[in-house]
Amino acid sequence: MSKKQIFIVGLDEFNRKKLERLPHAEWCEFHAALDFSDIRDVDRYDMAALIEKGTQRIEASRVKPDAIVAYYDFPATDLVPILSERFGTRAPTLEAVLKCEHKYWSRIIQQRVIEDCIPQFFSFDPFDAEAFDKIPLIPPFWIKPIKSFRSFLAYRINDVDEFQQVVPEIRENIHYMNEPFNYLFEAYPLPAEIGQMRDTCIAESVLSGSMCTVEGYVFDGAVVVYGVVDSVREQDRSSFARYEYPSGLPQEVQFRMADVARRAITEIGLDNSPFNIEFFWDQTYNYVTLLEINPRISQAHTDLFEKVHGISHHAIMLDVALGRKPKPLEYTGEFARAANFMLRTYEDGLVKAVPTDEQLQRAATEIPGAIVKLRVKPGQRLSELSGQDSYSYELANIYIGGRDQLELLGKYHRCLEMLRFDIERTGLSMV
């Protein structure tokens, strides 16, 4: 039997290893439609060039693709439907993907079916000198570009002074995501009233409570939720401290989130695609609120699923793309719980040294199952890193499995004792 040919937009070594450990690897071959370096840490996104490069890479392989997939955010998720249409593979439509990713457009659609489960929202033009006065929200509220990822240029606004303080940063950098995103609306038959909006930012009322991510997929119109991952934030900060799985939220709350997810995904029209949706649960008022929809698996969760289920949810991504109904996940992994810890710093500096191979090997040996994924290299200045949130710099991801949360935290702190970062500080801290 000939193998299925799978092309990945944004293939990296970490996820390649996960893919090669799947049962699917016996009958699938994995290729890079684009490399990770094509879609991250770049000065600008030239969408036409990326589409052409992905097309040429697939054609040069001299094999017919059976599936084209991605597990990273923009531009990877947007390139999947474009390349899939060219090569005749199964994928969601570009319009459905953009309805998930365009924050204002998505809210307009969500408002039709889950109005009680979304924050108040208003679009605005960051270049308008009177923008703050035109936002009909009482601070605090959040502002962010209509298209962003990893909380890029997202700020919590407590008063007009803070608004005026961060707007210059938005004005200077919003083109990084806005221009390539708008290219899609210009080059493809998409609603002009959305693509040509003068407003390029959105303001939303503040959400509170426990945060989590619902992982699911749509297969031939049927929406299925198969996992909920807790997103634990740093104390008194908005940045994430770790992702932890399975969720500790009450089952009833998880079921409500799944119901909201089904209604939103169905109204948007996303089909033949995995998705992950970020939610808040306000324990005081027992409210469930949808934050954002991503038309892909979360690659940050793949190791968690592998540790708990014995298989990463790359399997679900592949099955959906190949037209195979995914099987339910079994709890056959090595650990009962798993976490992805995000080691962060809040002060700018120059990276002088990162953990050595010996330190990384010691952590893996003394803490079975531990994986350290470095996010910085010597010589990098933290403030020049791309794709960071507005309040911190991410140094590493540390993946750990354990019996329970207490053991996870204990292993994490043991791991930190083995790892050494040398950062020459500039004295400039994040907001």
Image (cartoon, rainbow, N blue to C red):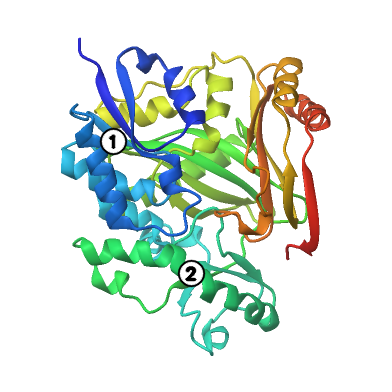
Residue 269 appears in view: no
Q: Between marks 1 and 2, how big is the CA–CA gap?
A: 29 Å
Q: Quadrant of residue 156?
A: bottom right
Q: Is residue 359 visible?
A: yes
Residue where numbered disc 1 is placed: 68
152 on left or right of 33 = right
Q: Amino acid at mark 1?
A: Ile
Determine the residue positioned at 52% across, 17% down: 310
Where 248 sits versus 42, above or below?
Answer: above
Tag 2: amino acid:
Ile
What residue is drawn where x is 43% and y is 19%? Answer: 20
Dividing the image into 4 quarters, which one contains the N terminus?
top left
Q: Is residue 243 above or below residue 424?
A: above
Residue 118 drawn at (x, y percent): 50, 61
Label 1 element class: strand
User: Which mark, residue 207?
Assistant: none
**Which part of the image, by quadrant, shows the C terminus?**
bottom right
The residue labelled by disc 2 is: 174
Residue nearer the viewer, 260 or 1: 1
Task: Work out whether residue 333 or residue 265 is closer to the camera in this orientation and state it.
Answer: 333
At 48% from the left and 39% from the top, the residue drawn is 298
Residue depicted at 53% across the width and 90% down the height: 130
Left or right: residue 148 compared with residue 67: right
SS at badge 2 = loop
Q: Position of residue 291 (x, y in %)?
A: 52, 55
Question: Could you say where residue 266 lies in the image, as x and y percent from the top left?
Answer: 32, 48
Image: 108 above or below 343:
below
